[in-house]
Image (cartoon, rainbow, N blue to C red):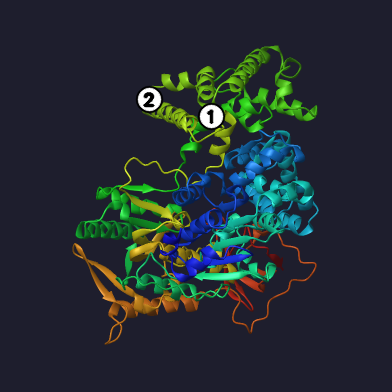
Amino acid sequence: MNNYLDTLNEPQREGVLNTDGPCMLIAGAGSGKTRVLTYRIAHLIQSKGVDAFNIMALTFTNKAAKEMRERIEKVIGPDARNLWMGTFHSVFARVLRAEAHYLGYPSNFTIYDTDDSKTLIKNIVKEMQLDDAVYKPNVVYNRISSAKNKLISWQEYLANPELMGDDAANMRPEIGKIYKTYALRCFKAGAMDFDDLLFNTDKLFREHLEVLNKYQQRIHYVLVDEFQDTNLCQYYIIRKLASVRENVCVVGDDAQSIYAFRGADISNILNFERDYPDLKIIKLEQNYRSTQNIVQAANSVIKKNKAQLPKNVWTANEEGNLIELIKSVSDNEEGRLVASSIFEEKMQHQLKFSDFAVLYRTNSQSRAIEESLRRLNVKYKVVGGLSFYQRKEIKDILAYLRYTLNQQDEASFRRIINLPKRGIGDATIDKIVVAANDHGTSIWDILQNPTPFVGGRAAAPIEDFVAMIKRFQLETERKDAYDCAFEIAKGSGLLRELYEDKTVEGLSRYENVQELLNAIKEFVDDKEREDKSLGSFLQEVSLLTSNDEDKDKDPDKVTLMTIHMAKGLEFKYVYIVGMEEDLFPSQMMLSSRAELEEERRLFYVAITRAEKRLFLSYALTRYRFGRLKNCEPSRFLEDIDTGYLRMSSKVGSGYQSSPVHSSSGNSHYAKNLVSGIKKTIASKPVSPKPAATQAYVAPADFVPSNTANLQEGMKVEHPKFGFGQVIQLDNSSPDRKAKIQFDNFGEKTLLLSFAKLKIHN
């Protein structure tokens, strides 16, 4: 172990050895935090004699947990397998499997993925006879998810006038009732969605102190990776578990907090010291990843944020190249210039395609890049596409497996009852669901005696379906996951149906199902796995994150992904495209300083993915929502100290670069760049003007108006910005926008579906 300690710098070594009491490791980008966490756990077990069963380490992806466990195992041996290590969802799903009966759930409860949840919401909206164009499943799901992340139950939601008022202002007054119905239907189905795994863990620990006490005595040390990404619910669970011994160690970087849209709360890390006055703070500030120019450029960007923990990230690496800024006339030309640059850099420096990554703010930006790469025969992969486990044929098989284990699972029932076709139509399915709800019983009970509810003709295929499921149930009692899955895939008729489809798509779907069966066989053949049951496999699959699947047989490809997807990764060469106002920063993130600062943190994350070279690209025109729009350089380009930038222009077959600064003064490109960006910043106020402007306080009787008939020239009132006049309406995009000149806060562009405006005649 001492040999490993010798490989650490002084702050890293302190982070390993300072094991008792509350500790926060502020880990700058590329500072080796995973190594510190790994050795800290190994030190607890090997040097301090702590039992691995008494240590809980929480991550945000199964992949990260697996890699950390493997590293620890290399240091201390197989004892590492006894750690409570995994994602928040996987670790606490394990707790809930053992304790679910306290909450009235079966131990084999189903875990609904996002698609399952949205399908159920869609059915509820239909049953409530609501407008599905207003109550879109995605919107309703996100609203419910946000409430759960803040530990707001459906009962509290319905009793909260502010939440109900927000829904009414957004023309969706029934979301609270949908939340109630959704929660009750999940409970009745013996199912939890991803948010429930945490929401119900907190509820379990809060309402059943004997259970909390059991786990407090079992878990002596709690370690949390990527702490800046935790939400309120996750933080409360951590605090409860660690409240007896306070041996809690959190690792994170506030500068990389970019998931507020998923419920992450940056105040967890910013205010951690308030809850733990004896907190030991250790700063990991040496960057081992990037060149000096990249590190210092990132520092110059993030220092513009006000809400942050002070640190000074530095590196002993080489100075490296200046950051290259690529200016293009259009988004299509941007694609050509970036693709050409990648091709030329690869050929000139004998690199691999996998050394390159193109990062963008939104998925739609990949089109121009993809087309240009294809023209040059450059291999690439788009990360964040359809997951293997989200493909229809895979979800169909998994639904059969899930329903075999849990006959209360409504989502799986709806998916498989007429798959393959067995003459059971939607009207019959609706009758079954209504009958179950009206009689206060389960769908499975109705299925076992369907004739009184659906008639004799429809009853026969239903009875055959029930007999088949019962036969599958018997298989699960005496066979492992693979044998069960193969029997179900074969016995259901799905395997035959796919095999008989000889189209290219059909063959692909059949091969995908075979690959699923291969994965289950691999699961069963794992000698270190004790539980080889079908239930164990389904739990593991249901908790996979988007970052856990990476089975590309040809890994030498350029990576294309959103910046959010890139967090935690690193590449030798990084291109950040679309550096334009209203795209990055996003138009949706300009209504408050907190939102703008999150966008700046996102830019910081993008910059710090680069090891050797960084390219920033912007276009003067871009197609958005079907219209060609003029663009201006992003204000974030102004945040970078000009000493780290170099302007590039395409000349012939190569690049000609000009530094933004020189001993004789700025170059022609630099002058245009800096003056253009400064002009942009001056014309785009962030949010409330300087400190001299007083925040507007809306009156107590403020009630937003219906903005469907809003017109240019109208006087309006906003609860944050006060009084103003509508100067322009934009109805071209799916979400209507209004440009408003506010009396005290200047010009703002607001999305009318979210803005709370009161119209004054």
Q: Which residue is mark 2?
A: 503
Give the foreground label among 2 and 1: 1
Q: Position of residue 681 (x, y in %)?
A: 47, 76
| Front residue of this view, candidates 294 and 704 | 294
Element under disc 1: helix
Q: Quadrant of the C terminus?
A: bottom right
Element under disc 2: loop
Q: Does residue 388 sit above or below 740 in this rendering? A: above
Q: Which residue is mark 1?
A: 396
Q: Residue most toward the bottom?
A: 664
Identify residue type, mark 1.
Asp
| Front residue of this view, candidates 761 and 644 | 644
Q: Position of residue 118 (x, y in %)?
A: 61, 41
Q: Does residue 760 sit above or below 351 in this rendering? A: below
Q: Does residue 613 sit above or below 524 in this rendering? A: below
| Front residue of this view, candidates 388 and 216 | 216
Local packing at callout 1 (Cα closer than 10 Å; few below 14, some 14-19, many 20+) is: many
Distance between the Cα atoms at labels 2 and 1? 19 Å
